[in-house]
């Protein structure tokens, strides 16, 4: 409503990244379990972070690249 398109765009990048975290969490889970065979709780702790952090990092890189111009 206020016309702040850049702020809204940044928010939507982050929102999309976090919405996809459920998908990336499962992908990381299969990869971690396949490669390292950790205990289930250890795998859960690791993939819980890997589902969020890389997604947000990539979103922030895209935001900074887009608005650097």
Image: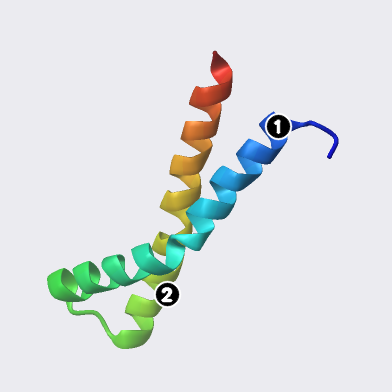
Q: What label sits on residue 5 in the rendered view?
A: 1
The correct choice, above or below, for 52 with respect to 60 in the image is: below
Task: Find residue 51 and report its horizontal and vertical position in percent.
Answer: 42, 63
Task: Find residue 38 and report its horizontal and vertical position in percent.
Answer: 24, 79
The correct choice, above or below, for 21 with respect to 14 in the image is: below
Residue placed at 14% from the left, 69% from the top?
A: 35
**SS category of the residue bearing label 2:** helix
Residue placed at 38% from the left, 85% from the top?
A: 41
The correct choice, above or below, for 11 with respect to 29 in the image is: above
Q: Which residue is mark 2?
A: 45
Q: Farthest residue to the bottom: give it.
A: 40
Left or right placement of residue 29 versus residue 56 in this view: left
C-alpha separation, residue under disc 2 versus residue under disc 1 = 36 Å
N-terminal of the pair, mark 2 or mark 1, is 1
The part of the image, by quadrant, that contains residue 42 is: bottom left
The part of the image, by quadrant, that contains residue 30 is: bottom left
Left or right placement of residue 60 versus residue 4 in this view: left
Left or right placement of residue 2 versus residue 57 in this view: right
**SS category of the residue bearing label 1:** helix
Q: Quadrant of the C terminus?
A: top right
Between 17 and 38, the one lying in front of the other is 17
Residue placed at 38% from the left, 78% from the top?
A: 44
Q: Farthest residue to the front: give it.
A: 1
Task: Find residue 43 and report its horizontal and vertical position in percent.
Answer: 33, 77
């Amino acid at each position: 409503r206020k016309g702040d398109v850049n702020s809204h765009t940044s928010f939507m990048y982050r929102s999309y990244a976090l919405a996809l975290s459920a998908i990336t969490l499962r992908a990381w889970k299969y990869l971690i379990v396949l490669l390292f065979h950790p205990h289930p709780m250890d795998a859960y702790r690791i993939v819980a972070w890997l589902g969020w952090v890389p997604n947000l990092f990539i979103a922030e890189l895209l935001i900074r690249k887009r608005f650097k111009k």
